[in-house]
Image (cartoon, coloured by chain):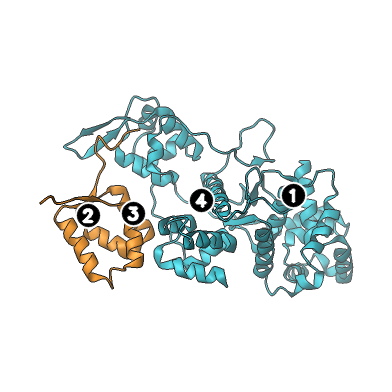
Chain colours: A cyan, B orange
C-alpha cells in the first residue's frame, strides 16, 4: 500500500487493492451508483477505482468508511477477508444469492460482531457460552414441544394474561432466553427483509428481532427464532405466520411459535366464546391485548381451526399489514437523530440486560478497557452509569 | 535537557477524563494543555474521530486542541 501526496499536501491518494475496494462495497450492500452519489462523483470514477486505474483519496475512503460502518483500516487490507456466513434465507430459491437491504446487512454484521464479543466476555468468566437447551430434530412434533416449553417456562394462560403490556411479556421471555445463554438483540431493519434471524453456528447463540415491527409481531418472531435455535438452524425469518410458508423448517418454527403463544386447546374455547364477533376489529384488539399476540397470528389461528374462511383471513391480514417507512433519498445525509428515546433505554432495548451485565463485569475486573465497554454498548461516556444502573434493576 | 514528546491513544484520554474529569482536576488538564501548546503531545486524526463518538466533554477539549491531531502521512499508511 502506497500513498501519494498531491495538491500541496491537501489530497492524499491511497493505493488500495481494487479487489478489497470492491469487496467492501459489495459486502456492505452498496451499488456503484450509490457510492458515486455518496462521493459526489460519477459511476465511472467508482469503476475506475475498482479496475485499479484510479486511486481514491483518503477523504473519500473516510467517507466510505462512515457509510459502510467499517474501520478505515479495512480499506488497507491486502485481500478481502472471509466473513462468517449470512443467515439462510428461506424465501430465496435454492442456489440464488441472498440479497438484503444494506441496513439489514449492517444489522447482520453487527449481530455477528456482538456475538463474537459476547463469546470472549463470557469465556473470561469461564462460561462456555453454550446454549442451555436440548437440540431438537425436525421430526419432533413442534406443537408438543411448544407445550413442553410453556411448562418449562412456567407460562400458564393466567400468567400470560397478567402481564400488563406486551412489552412486559417480551422482556420476560427475553430474560428467560438470556438465562439459557441465548442473547437477544433488537435492531431496526426493513420489515420486508426480515422480522428476525437466529445465529446458531457460533456460541453464544443469538436471536435478532426487528425493532421496526409491532411488539406483538416481535413476540412471535422471538419464539419463531428460538425454535430455529432448538433446531440448530441459522436462518432469516420473514413472515411471522403465513399459510404460504413453504419450507418445512419455517413451517415447523411457525407451528412451534403459534402453539407456544396460544395453545390450541385454550384458543378453541376462547374463539367459541366470541361467537359471530370473532373476526371483528374490536375482538381482535381485545384478544391481542389479552394474550399479547398479533392480530395476524390470531387470524391465522382462526383459519387453522376453521373459525374463518381463507378470504376473511386474507382480508384481516391486509388490514393489519405492517407499514413500510417511506424510502428516503439516497446519498449524503446527516446522521439520523435518535428521536426522544433516552440512550440508556435504547441500549438496553438493543443489546439486552445480559449483554450489558457481561460487559460491566468484564470492565469491573479490568478485562476490558472503559473505551471497549463504551464501544461494545454503542454508548457515550455520559450514559455509561445510567445504562449500568438500569441493567442492574 | 531532553524534552520528551508523547503520542497518546483514544483509550488513555477517555480513561483519564473518566477518573480525572477535566472540570475537577484542573491542574492535570492544564498540564495537558501546555504539552499540546508546546508541541509535545500528539495523536493520529482518528483519535479525534473516536473521541467525538464516545465522550462529549472530551470532544470539546479535542476540538480546542486540533493542533495535536495529525493526518496520516506516507509512512503511516502501510498495509
Which residue is pictured at 28% across the width and 47% down the height? Answer: B44
Within-10-Å neighbours for mark 1: few <14, some 14–19, many 20+: some
Q: How far apart are marks 3 and 4 (CA)?
A: 37 Å
Which secondary structure lies at badge 1?
A: helix
Secondary structure, mark 2, is helix
**Nearer-the-camera pick, A246 or A134:** A134
Q: Which label sits in the foreground, 3 or 1?
A: 3
Tell me if label 4 and label 2 are in contact, CB under 8 Å: no
Do pointers 2 and 3 mark residues of a single chain?
yes
Alpha-carbon span between mark 4 and mark 2: 38 Å
Give the crowd class for mark 3: few <14, some 14-19, many >=20 residues within 10 Å: some
Chain for mark 4? A
The CA span between labels 2 and 1 is: 53 Å
Q: In which quarter of the image is residue A185?
A: bottom right
| Chain where mark 1 sits | A
Q: Which of B69 and A299 is in front in this view?
A: B69
Which residue appears farthest toward the front when viewing the image? B1
Q: Quadrant of the C terminus of chain B?
A: top left
Which of the two discs, 2 and 3, labels the residue nearer the N terminus? 3
What whole-number distance in Å separates the C-alpha atoms at marks 2 and 3? 14 Å
Real-space CA distance between mark 1 and mark 4, rounded to the nearest whole angstrom:
36 Å
To which residue does mark 2 refer? B66
User: Tag 3's secondary structure?
Assistant: helix
Observer-nearest residue: A345 or A53? Answer: A345
Circle 4 residue: A327
Q: Residue under label 1, please give it.
A: A230
Q: Is residue A102 left or right of residue A63?
A: right
> Height in image: A99 above or below A265?
above
Q: Which mark is on residue B10? A: 3
Amino acid at each position: 500500500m502506497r500513498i501519494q501526496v498531491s495538491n500541496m499536501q491537501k489530497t492524499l491518494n491511497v493505493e488500495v487493492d481494487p479487489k478489497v475496494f470492491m469487496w467492501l462495497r459489495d459486502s456492505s450492500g452498496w451499488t456503484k451508483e450509490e457510492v458515486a452519489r455518496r462521493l459526489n462523483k460519477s459511476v465511472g470514477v467508482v469503476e475506475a477505482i475498482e479496475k485499479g486505474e484510479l486511486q481514491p483519496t483518503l477523504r473519500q475512503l473516510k467517507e466510505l468508511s462512515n457509510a459502510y460502518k467499517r474501520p478505515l483500516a479495512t480499506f488497507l487490507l491486502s485481500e478481502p477477508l472471509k466473513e462468517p456466513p449470512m443467515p439462510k434465507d428461506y424465501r430465496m430459491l435454492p442456489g440464488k444469492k441472498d440479497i438484503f437491504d444494506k441496513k439489514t446487512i449492517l444489522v447482520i454484521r453487527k449481530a455477528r460482531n456482538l456475538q463474537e464479543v459476547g463469546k470472549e466476555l463470557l469465556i473470561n468468566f469461564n462460561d462456555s457460552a453454550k446454549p442451555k437447551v436440548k437440540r431438537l430434530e425436525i421430526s419432533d412434533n413442534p406443537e408438543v414441544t411448544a407445550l413442553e416449553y410453556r411448562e418449562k417456562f412456567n407460562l400458564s394462560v393466567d400468567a400470560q394474561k397478567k402481564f400488563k403490556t406486551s412489552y412486559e411479556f417480551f422482556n420476560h421471555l427475553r430474560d428467560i432466553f438470556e438465562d439459557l445463554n441465548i442473547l437477544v438483540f433488537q435492531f431496526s431493519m426493513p420489515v420486508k427483509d426480515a422480522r428476525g434471524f437466529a445465529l446458531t453456528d457460533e456460541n453464544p447463540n443469538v436471536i435478532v428481532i426487528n425493532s421496526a415491527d409491532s411488539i406483538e409481531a416481535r413476540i412471535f418472531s422471538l419464539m419463531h427464532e428460538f425454535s430455529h435455535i432448538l433446531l440448530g438452524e441459522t436462518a432469516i425469518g420473514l413472515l411471522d405466520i403465513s399459510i404460504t410458508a413453504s419450507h418445512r423448517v419455517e413451517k415447523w418454527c411457525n407451528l412451534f411459535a403459534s402453539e407456544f403463544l396460544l395453545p390450541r386447546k385454550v384458543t378453541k374455547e376462547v374463539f367459541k366464546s366470541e361467537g359471530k364477533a370473532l373476526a371483528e376489529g374490536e375482538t381482535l384488539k381485545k384478544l391481542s391485548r389479552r394474550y399479547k399476540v398479533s392480530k395476524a397470528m390470531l387470524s391465522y389461528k382462526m383459519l387453522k381451526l376453521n373459525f374463518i374462511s381463507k378470504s376473511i383471513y386474507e382480508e384481516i391480514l391486509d388490514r393489519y399489514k405492517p407499514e413500510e417507512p417511506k424510502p428516503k433519498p439516497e446519498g449524503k445525509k446527516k446522521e439520523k437523530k435518535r428521536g426522544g428515546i433516552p440512550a440508556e433505554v435504547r441500549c438496553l432495548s438493543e443489546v439486552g440486560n445480559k449483554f450489558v451485565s457481561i460487559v460491566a463485569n468484564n470492565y469491573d475486573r479490568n478485562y476490558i478497557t472503559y473505551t471497549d465497554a463504551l464501544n461494545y454498548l454503542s454508548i457515550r461516556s455520559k450514559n455509561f452509569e445510567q445504562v449500568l444502573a438500569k441493567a442492574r434493576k | 535537557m531532553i524534552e520528551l514528546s508523547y503520542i497518546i491513544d483514544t483509550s488513555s484520554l477517555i480513561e483519564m477524563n473518566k477518573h480525572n474529569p477535566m472540570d475537577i482536576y484542573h491542574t492535570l488538564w492544564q498540564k495537558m494543555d501546555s504539552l499540546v501548546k508546546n508541541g509535545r503531545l500528539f495523536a493520529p486524526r482518528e483519535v479525534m474521530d473516536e473521541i467525538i463518538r464516545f465522550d462529549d466533554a472530551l470532544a470539546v477539549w479535542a476540538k480546542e486542541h486540533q493542533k495535536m491531531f495529525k493526518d496520516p502521512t506516507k509512512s503511516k499508511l502501510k498495509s
